[in-house]
C-alpha cells in the first residue's frame, strides 16, 4: 500500500454515477451488481445507503464516512442488523456524507458440500467498485466493527483511505482455525501512516494487546487500568476504551475526527 503523505492524496477517479441523490438520503438495492452466476463466490453489495450532509450542520466535511459491514462470512464477530443507522444519521447531521455499505457472501447451496475457504479478494474488489461509483472527492474514512474490520483492513492494503475506525477488531489470526469458516483469514502488512482509531472494552483490549498487531505495537496499557483512555502511541494510531456501541462511543469517534481535522 502506498504511503499516504496527506489525507487528500489519491483522489478517487469517478466512474459513472449510479443514481442521483434525491432529498436528504437515498438507498439503492444492489443485488444485481454481483456476478449473475450462482455460487459461493458470487459476492454482492446488498446495501448502499447514502446520507448527504445536513443543511443545518455548522460545516460540511469533504471527507465521506463509509460504515462497512461484511455479511455472511460465518466467523467470529458481532454483527447486528441496522447497527450503523443511528451513527450514519448522526454523522450526516454533523456535516459528513455518510454511506452504509454491506458486502455479502451469499449462502452456499444446500447441496454444496465443498468447505473450501473464500479469499477476501473478491470482497475487496466489490467494496472498491462501490466506493468508486460514489464519485467522492477524497478517500473515505472507513468505520467497521467485529468481523467487518477484516475487510476494512484488507481494503486499505491496496486502496487509499483518509482514516480508519476499528471497533472490536479481530485478532491477527483466526482464533478458531479448526471450525468451518467461509472466509480465509487475511494477513495484514500495511503500516499506519494515516489516522487510525481502535476502540473496544477494557478486557478485549487486554487480549488484543497480544493478538492484534495495532494494539500490540501502538497501545499503552495504563498502570491503574482505569476506564477511559487505554493509551495511544506510535504513528497515527489512537486506542480508546468504550463500554458498548452507543451514542457515547459515537461521540468518542466524532471527537477523534475533530482532532484529525476532518
Image (spheres, helix red, strand yellow):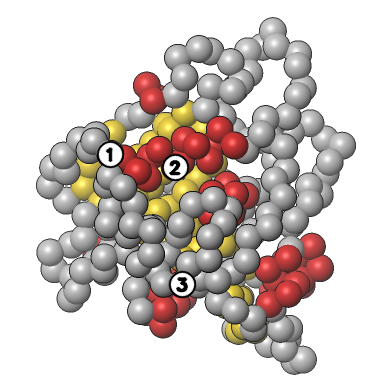
Please name whichever residue, 244 or 49, is drawn nearer the observer in this view of the structure. Answer: 49
Q: For mark 3, what is the residue?
A: 5
**Earlier sequence position, callout 2 versus callout 1:** 1
Q: Are there few (<14), some (14-19), or many (20+) residues within 10 Å of tag 1? A: few
Q: Determine whether label 2 and label 1 are within 8 Å by CB.
A: no
Q: Determine whether label 2 and label 3 are within 8 Å by CB.
A: no
Please name whichever residue, 84 or 108, is drawn nearer the observer in this view of the structure. Answer: 108
The answer to whether 24 appears left or right of 40 in the picture is left
Q: At 60% across and 79% down in the image, what residue appears? A: 235
Image quadrant occupied by the C terminus: bottom left
In terms of secondary structure, where does tag 3 sit? loop
Q: For mark 1, what is the residue?
A: 15
Q: Return the x and y of residue 133 as percentages of the image width and height.
A: 31, 40
Q: At 59% across and 23% down in the image, what residue appears? A: 41
Q: At 59% across and 37% down in the image, what residue appears? A: 121
**Earlier sequence position, callout 2 versus callout 3:** 3
The answer to whether 1 appears left or right of 66 in the picture is right
Above or below: residue 214 compared with residue 150? below
| Alpha carbon separation for disc pair 2 and 1 | 12 Å
Above or below: residue 254 compared with residue 156? below
The answer to whether 256 appears left or right of 239 in the picture is left
Image quadrant occupied by the N terminus: bottom right
In terms of secondary structure, where does tag 1 sit? loop
Q: For mark 2, what is the residue?
A: 128
Residue 246 in view of the camera: no
Q: Return the x and y of residue 24 as percentages of the image width and height.
A: 16, 51
Of circles 2 and 3, the one toward us is 3
Of circles 2 and 1, the one toward us is 1
Amino acid at each position: 500500500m502506498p504511503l499516504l503523505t496527506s489525507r487528500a492524496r489519491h483522489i478517487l477517479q469517478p466512474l459513472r454515477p449510479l443514481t442521483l441523490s434525491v432529498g436528504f438520503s437515498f438507498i439503492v438495492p444492489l443485488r444485481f451488481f454481483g456476478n449473475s452466476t450462482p455460487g459461493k463466490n458470487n459476492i454482492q453489495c446488498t446495501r448502499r445507503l447514502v446520507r448527504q450532509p445536513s443543511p443545518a450542520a455548522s460545516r460540511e466535511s469533504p471527507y465521506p464516512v463509509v460504515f462497512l459491514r461484511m455479511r455472511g462470512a460465518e466467523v467470529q464477530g458481532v454483527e447486528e442488523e441496522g447497527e450503523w443507522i443511528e451513527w450514519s444519521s448522526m454523522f450526516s447531521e454533523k456535516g459528513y456524507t455518510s454511506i452504509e455499505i454491506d458486502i455479502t457472501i451469499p449462502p452456499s447451496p444446500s447441496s454444496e458440500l465443498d468447505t473450501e475457504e473464500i479469499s477476501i479478494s473478491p470482497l475487496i474488489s466489490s467494496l472498491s467498485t462501490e466506493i468508486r461509483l460514489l464519485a467522492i472527492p477524497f478517500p473515505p474514512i472507513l468505520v467497521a466493527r467485529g468481523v467487518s474490520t477484516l475487510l476494512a483492513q484488507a481494503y486499505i492494503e491496496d486502496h487509499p483511505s483518509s482514516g480508519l475506525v476499528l471497533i472490536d477488531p479481530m485478532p491477527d489470526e483466526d482464533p478458531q482455525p479448526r471450525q468451518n469458516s467461509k472466509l480465509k483469514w487475511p494477513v495484514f502488512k500495511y503500516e499506519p501512516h494515516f489516522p487510525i482509531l481502535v476502540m473496544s472494552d477494557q478486557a478485549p483490549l487486554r487480549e488484543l494487546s497480544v493478538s492484534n498487531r495495532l494494539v500490540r505495537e501502538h497501545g499503552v496499557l495504563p498502570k491503574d487500568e482505569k476506564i477511559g483512555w487505554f493509551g495511544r502511541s506510535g504513528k497515527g494510531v489512537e486506542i480508546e476504551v468504550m463500554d458498548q456501541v452507543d451514542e457515547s462511543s459515537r461521540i468518542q469517534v466524532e471527537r477523534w475526527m475533530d482532532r484529525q481535522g476532518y
